[in-house]
Image (cartoon, rainbow, N blue to C red):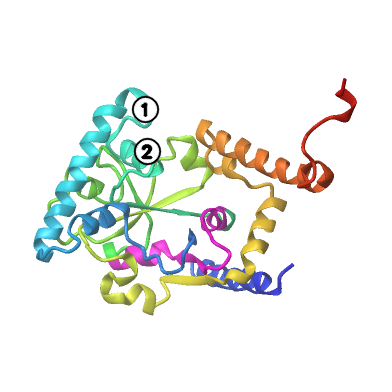
Amino acid sequence: MNPEFISFLDQIESIKAGLEAKGSTVWFRGISQSAYNLSTTLQREVNKLTEGISVSDEERNSLLRQYGKLIYWKFQSYARSLLNSQENTKYGILFRMRHHGIPCNIMDWTESLTCALHFAQRAWKPDQEAAIYILDPQALNGFALNRSEIACIDDEGLGNFPSRLWHPVSIESMNLPTVAVLPYHSNPRTIAQRAMFTLNGSSLLPLEDQFDGKLVKENVLMKILLPSSICESVRRYLRLSGVDEFNYFPDFEGLSHKILLDLDNERETTRKQFPHLFSKGNTGADSGNKA
């Protein structure tokens, strides 16, 4: 196996052991281009909306809040009949939005390095650098909530922090920090991906720049680069581990992606096994059928 990939795994193991030794858990996030920052899809949407025009931070913040509400209510109005009873709550709907790419103030993480690598390689081009982010969620909440524990969401207000204030329909303050939260595992994707989430409050900044950059300075948030030279090694590792799209998207969308990819692979295997059938000189005529 590629020595660089082995070195990467050793580095992850060392960081994980260090965090666990001080009582923290470890969250991962894989990205296919190392230049991507840790902005939520809602932040990116507002950035696109205001690109090229002059707006104050206060106006952008207001757009962040109002746009979040608008998108949430629109999704909810159409999705109610499609949701199971466990998801039909304010945060259950928000988590479902995130898993289908709808802009919102949630960023997904995973407790599984393999899952993070899968997401990193989905759109990883072999000539580009990917990355894995590592987060200490307890330390993040030490900054955000002055309590080094993962926040528990509860629609009835029974959790260990006032989660209602962070929901798009309720956000009014311009001073809500990003928090690490334990989600409802109310749909198959959340369970399969061992999903965890950070919940952005009112900041316009990507996570790495929030809290005056202290998350990065104090190794609460770390970025491990994946050089292009290990792209194929990562994909080989995932294949050997039996990982494919259906593992993390256990629904018809994931199944169709898996089958189509399997067909591509089988087509390529067939071409290699029977090269004479696909040579340029083969016209496809069957001499045995000539009259």
Disc 1 residue crowd, few under 14, some 14–19, many 20+, Cα 10 Å: some
Q: Residue at x 12, y 65 (%)?
A: 57
The question of residue 130 being in magenta is answered with: yes
Amino acid type indicated by mark 1 = Leu
* Pick the front one: 257 or 52: 52
Secondary structure category for the residue under label 2: helix
* Pick the front one: 262 or 147: 262
Amino acid type indicated by mark 2 = Arg
Q: Residue at x 50, y 67 (%)?
A: 131
Residue 83: numbered disc: 1
Q: Compared with residue 77, is residue 197 higher up or lower down, i.e. above or below? A: below
Q: Compared with residue 148, is residue 164 higher up or lower down, i.e. above or below? A: above
Q: Residue at x 46, y 48 (%)?
A: 195
Secondary structure category for the residue under label 1: loop
Q: Position of residue 165 (x, y in %)?
A: 19, 49
For the residues labelled 2 and 1, say whether their Cβ atoms are less than 8 Å apart.
Answer: yes
* Pick the front one: 153 or 219: 219
Q: Earlier in the sequence, mark 2 or mark 1?
A: 1
Q: Which residue is mark 2?
A: 96
* Residue 108 seen by the camera: yes
Q: Which residues are magenta?
A: 115-143
